[in-house]
Amino acid sequence: MQRLIAAALIAILPALAQAGERWLTLPHPGPMPAAERFGLAPVNGIKMYYAVYGSGKPVLLIHGGLANANIWSAQVADLMRDHMVIVADSRGHGQSTRNEQPYSYDLMASDYLALLDFLGIEKTDLVGWSDGGIIAIDIALHHPERLNKVFAQAANVTTDGVDPAVETNPTFGAYVEWMAEEYARLSPTPDDFDGFVNQIAGMWATQPNWSDAELAKITVPITIALGDHDEAITRVHTDHMAAVIPGAKEVILKDVSHFAMLQAPEEYNAAVRAAID
């Protein structure tokens, strides 16, 4: 039944797109550019898929929950012109493996720090979307020496920052169905999407849960971004994050949702460059 509902939601989306509201659409990314290097890094007991593009000042892009690095194709194509761009699949996502360790944002942040060590990168800019933005904030809190600047889009710092209505949102339902297909195509355990979701959902139920006092200790320059039609994260929560984190800049992306990098890639890229360049 759940898959039938999701299929119906996917059928609705083209009609919504014709209505001219891009924040209701879910464009798929184009193909990734050719990587300078790629592989599987041994990280915290898993194999983490990564790819590196271009040269110059490093910038790490971290995708959101259930997704994979391919979501960033438009951003990689733009940033690799004058940056070294690093992407990876978070543990259990895309081509990366997972183990029995319970998911936590601290663990996922540790994975990315270990990947940077593997690649010989001491310090980087970081662009994070959704779960990737939360991982970025985790690193900013605990390992600020590894970061130059952060662009965190559609992140939350407590679980009450998530809008409960996301569970019945058509665009988000279509996204989950799409990611199930991506998992089957890319994962080393292609038949275990439900097990993967159940494992990571244990983290989402209780994390993140940072206090204002903890957030007030962040010293890394950070831009907090949100689409003005985000399905998952509330504007009130985002406003509070920007107010509590010292020196944070708040950017509201116009006429886009949680999937801003897909819906308005040129505008998204400009916002990223304004934050990190």
Image (spheres, rainbow, N blue to C red):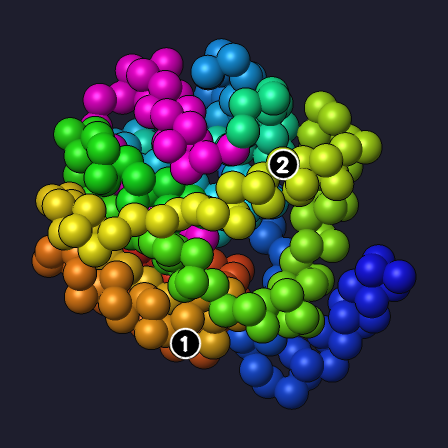
Q: Position of residue 30 (x, y in %)?
A: 60, 50
**On the rendered structure, is 275 left or right of 70?**
left
Q: Nearer the viewer, residue 69 or 225?
A: 225
Q: Position of residue 272 (x, y in %)?
A: 30, 55
**Residue visible at 45% across and 53% down?**
130
How many numbered tags mark residues here? 2
Q: Is residue 77 visible?
A: no
**Residue visible at 81% across and 32% down?**
191
- Is 24 part of what is drawn in magenta? no
Give above or below for 126 relative to 41. below
Q: Which residue is mark 1?
A: 228
Q: Position of residue 101 (x, y in %)?
A: 54, 23
> Nearer the N terminus, badge 2 or badge 1?
2
Residue 224 falls in which quadrant of the image?
Answer: bottom left
Q: Is residue 69 visible?
A: yes
**On the rendered structure, is 57 left or right of 71?**
left
Q: Nearer the viewer, mark 2 or mark 1?
A: 2
Badge 1 amino acid: Asp
Give above or below for 37 relative to 159. above
- Assign a secondary structure to mark 2: helix
**On the rendered structure, is 209 left or right of 33?**
left
Q: Residue furthest bottom?
A: 19
Q: Nearer the viewer, residue 28 or 137?
A: 137
Q: Nearer the viewer, residue 76 or 68?
A: 68
Q: Which residue is mark 2?
A: 199
**Residue visible at 61% across and 21% down?**
100
Binning the other alpha carbons within 10 Å of mark 1 as few (below 14), some (14 to 19) or many (20 upward) gives some
Quadrant containing the N terminus in the rendered view = bottom right
Residue 200 falls in which quadrant of the image?
Answer: top right
- Magenta part of the chain: 103-130
- Kindly identify which numbered label has been placed on residue 94: none
**Residue visible at 70% across and 62% down?**
174
